[in-house]
Image (cartoon, grey):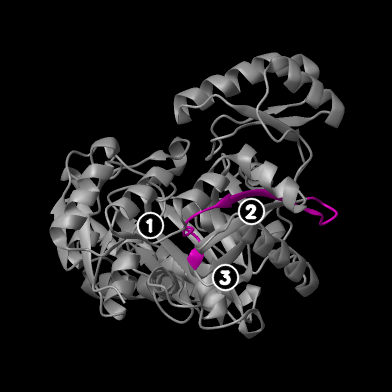
Amino acid sequence: MFKKILIANRGEIAVRVIRACREMGIRSVAVFSDVDRASLHVRKADEAYPIGPATASESYLNKDKILAVARRSGAEAIHPGYGFLSENASFAQACVDAGIKFIGPTAAAMEAMGSKTRARQAMEKAGVPFVPGSSRGHDFGETHKVAEKIGYPVMLKAAAGGGGKGMRLVRSAAELRSAFDAASSEAKRSFGDDEVYVEKYIENPRHIEMQILSDEHGQTVYLGERECSVQRRHQKVLEECPSPIVSPEMRRQMGDVAVRVAQTAGYTNAGTVEFLVDQQRNFYFLEMNTRLQVEHPVTELVTGLDLVHLQIRIAAGEPLPFQQQNIALRGHAIECRIYAEDPDNNYFPSPGRISLLEIPAGPGIRRDTGIYEGWTVPIDYDPLLAKLIGYGSDRNQAIHRLQRALYEYVVAGIKTNITLFQRILQDADFHAGKLDTGYLERLLSKPAPPPGLDDGMDRTAERERVAALAAGIFATLESAAPKSVNGAAANGAAAPAKPSAWKQAARVEALRNG
């Protein structure tokens, strides 16, 4: 086993990996940019090294600087977390060349699955079902022919894409030219590659992904699915395990396909195979994410497995300690991504100092975070503050535990999207599991309920406390007031006959709750 691991990341995922290292008796090495000097991951690590300015290309994306720290610190392996260099095949290869273990797949497997068109070509050969369309990028003329063949609406997608960039929905031939030019241009700006391919647009699909693990001895297993259909601007905001619509037989079929995808790519370590699911519950391969996912905690809670521990053990050459038949799903878990965003300003980032932090706890609640009270959230990176996860014996209990935890969660000094999750978890369609990738857009197009009425909490106890407080204030004020004599005030004026509004309110609340 490794004695020391460098974590090439920041924020909550860096803290998550550092904690796993400590549990396994492995020393951890953090790296940090100038604005992250006081970050939680720097405080938690055994060692920490500066790697330059806030700009990611000069710090967390700078391969040479990170490898230099690994050599200087004596780290034997590098965990990339997610984002930054986690899916960079050249970095994975550079680690190998430097004699340092990259905790993730090989560069070859990453390259095979990193391009969406190369992945589609490989899956086509392996007989994996995928959305009809082209398996490589075309010029406009060929794209037009493919679109006519599969029928509108179609989606244009960047081959090197992600996060919704280089993606356009085209509903008719008249829209194709401008959409093609815009998608190609955006793909070039975002990824340095203007390759765009076309596929059939599936109306109101669900986005469901399958977690897999592959060791370096040829064994691959699947760990169940995650429902990821609650998205905003093609970005996941809430995930759950298992999916409300996946039956044991559908899970087995999706799992078998996911294992076939991983084995076709020669994949090792943790990975995720993503599917689109249509309204008839047909599923199609979408892409493979060659890293640990943000939403991995919901799988951990339902399977009882620690994915980061297993990632490290696989990288160290250990075989998987279980087989497919040993894996069972128990209960239900839901994750909310808590961002520093302003819901009243179109969810723009809301950096700044956290002046007060009240943390939810209690049964069935897990919170993975990279923040603390007094810390300043920088503007330079993804505004993810924490992941709040609720676990229960069933979906209903997980929802109610999360509602309670969101009610307890206070982050002051900056804006957060906590109210968004309070609204989702109160929504009737969410409770019924009526989800697709357009769900959140539809929900947000409706008028928001008045503040305080959309968090799903039982307000009886709160009303009782308010009533008791009002009665106490009234009693104090009444006893301190000048006494009247025979109905006349002390100053000789007539006593007022008007009843106290506080007293009336307290009596009404007491009667209502009696």
Which of the marked residues, 2 or 1, is nearer the chain's N terminus? 1
Element type at marker 3? loop
CA separation in Å, label 3 and label 2: 22 Å
Element type at marker 1? loop
Which of the marked residues, 3 or 2, is nearer the chain's N terminus? 3
Q: Nearer the viewer, residue 489 or 162?
A: 162
Which of the marked residues, 3 or 1, is nearer the chain's N terminus? 1
Q: Is residue 285 magenta?
A: yes
Q: Find residue 43 and report its horizontal and vertical position in percent.
A: 17, 64
Question: What residue did someone put label 2 on?
Answer: 274
Residue occupying image coordinates x 44% and y 74%: 310
Using residue 186 as the reference point, say whether residue 474 is left or right of it.
left
How dense is the environment of label 1, judged by Cα within 10 Å: few (below 14), some, or many (20 and up)?
A: many
Q: Nearer the viewer, residue 75 or 362?
A: 75
Q: Find residue 101 and report its horizontal and vertical position in percent.
A: 33, 61
Q: Are marks 3 and 2 in contact (CB under 8 Å)?
A: no
- Numbered circle sitting on residue 110: none
The amino acid type, in three-letter code, at marker 1 is Gly
Question: What residue did someone put label 3 on?
Answer: 218
Q: Is residue 115 magenta?
A: no
The amino acid type, in three-letter code, at marker 3 is Gly
Which residues make up the magenta segment?
Answer: 278-296
Residue occupying image coordinates x 50% and y 61%: 295
Using residue 387 as the reference point, say whether residue 35 is left or right of it.
left
Instruction: Report if residue 437 is visible in the image.
Output: no
Residue occupying image coordinates x 55% and y 57%: 238
Question: What residue did someone put label 1 on?
Answer: 81
Q: Are marks 3 and 1 in contact (CB under 8 Å)?
A: no
Quarter the N terminus occupies: bottom left
CA separation in Å, label 3 and label 1: 24 Å
